[in-house]
Amino acid sequence: MEDFKSVKNELQNIIEGKSGSRESNPIQAAKAYLRNHTQSSGENKGSKPDRPEEEGALKQYARENGLFIEKSGLGVFITSGAEQKIFYKENDTTLFKIADAIFYRTWEDYLNNLLLHNYFFTDTAYTLVGFLEDEDRFYAVVKQQFVLLTEKTDLDSIKRYLLANGFTHKKNNDYYHPYLGVILEDLHDENVLTSDGVLFFIDTVFYLTEAFYTSK
């Protein structure tokens, strides 16, 4: 339990922008701008900004920092899911992914998801490289290490791994960490790859609950 307390404290610091990895710094910078340029943002406030307000702030952030990216520069489109589209450049060891945060109520929630992923799964950490607009939709652009799939992922192995790390199984491919107050969903065998017997979590859907912000 004491270990989980330390983890929770570290995660709270990361979400608040007080600590973080090299990969997470650009995410925290975008989140800080978002919080400072919307009327009602922040985990401890009564309401959150609507998505048009958030997108307006992020577009301004991208303009001010030269972070608007051309889709043509991402490489060849290879596949897409409900949450993002994936691009690959020949001979590159990373993939580019664009996401419109469809699974999240706010863009801040999406950025929190990236920060949580980077803490738990450093081997496949996301780096926020910019933003783009395509067909009247706004996307975040992230970069992630390419993982070579060598075998089909056993869903029971994902379950065993997460249970051993304090998560409880909710239903289907969804989990919850009761001490941390963190939800982790959509862990099917296309979002968790197996390479040479090792699990790599490449696409995760994290949510923070109110319990995350309480001290234990």
Image (spheres, helix red, strand yellow):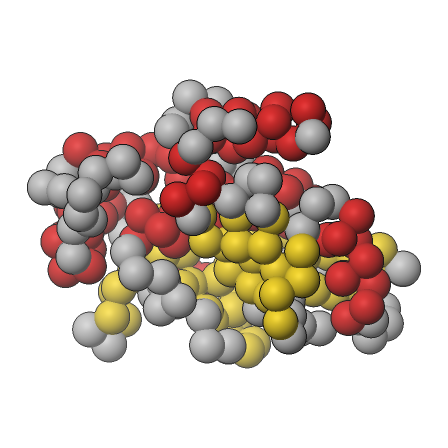
Residue 41, percent across and down? 20, 41
Residue with the most extreme front position = 216
Can residue 61 be spotted in the picture? no
Is 114 situated above or below 4?
Answer: below
Residue 125, percent across and down? 59, 45
* Left or right: 38 as drawn, with respect to 164: left
Residue with the most extreme right position = 197
> Looking at this view, is 191 or 15 the one in front?
15
Picture residue at 65% right of the left edge, 45% below the top: 121
Residue 106: quadrant of the picture: bottom left
Can residue 161 be spotted in the picture? yes
> Looking at this view, is 61 or 117 the one in front?
117
Q: How many marks?
A: 0
Picture residue at 83% right of the left edge, 63% below the top: 157
Is 26 situated above or below 155?
Answer: above
* Left or right: 119 as drawn, with respect to 77: right
Residue 140, percent across and down? 36, 56
Image quarter hosting the N terminus: top right
Residue with the most extreme left position = 39
Residue 64, percent across and down? 18, 38
Residue 119: quadrant of the picture: top right
Picture residue at 18% right of the left edge, 43% below the top: 46
* Left or right: 55 as drawn, with respect to 102: left
Is 114 situated above or below 42?
Answer: below
* Left or right: 148 as drawn, with respect to 59: right
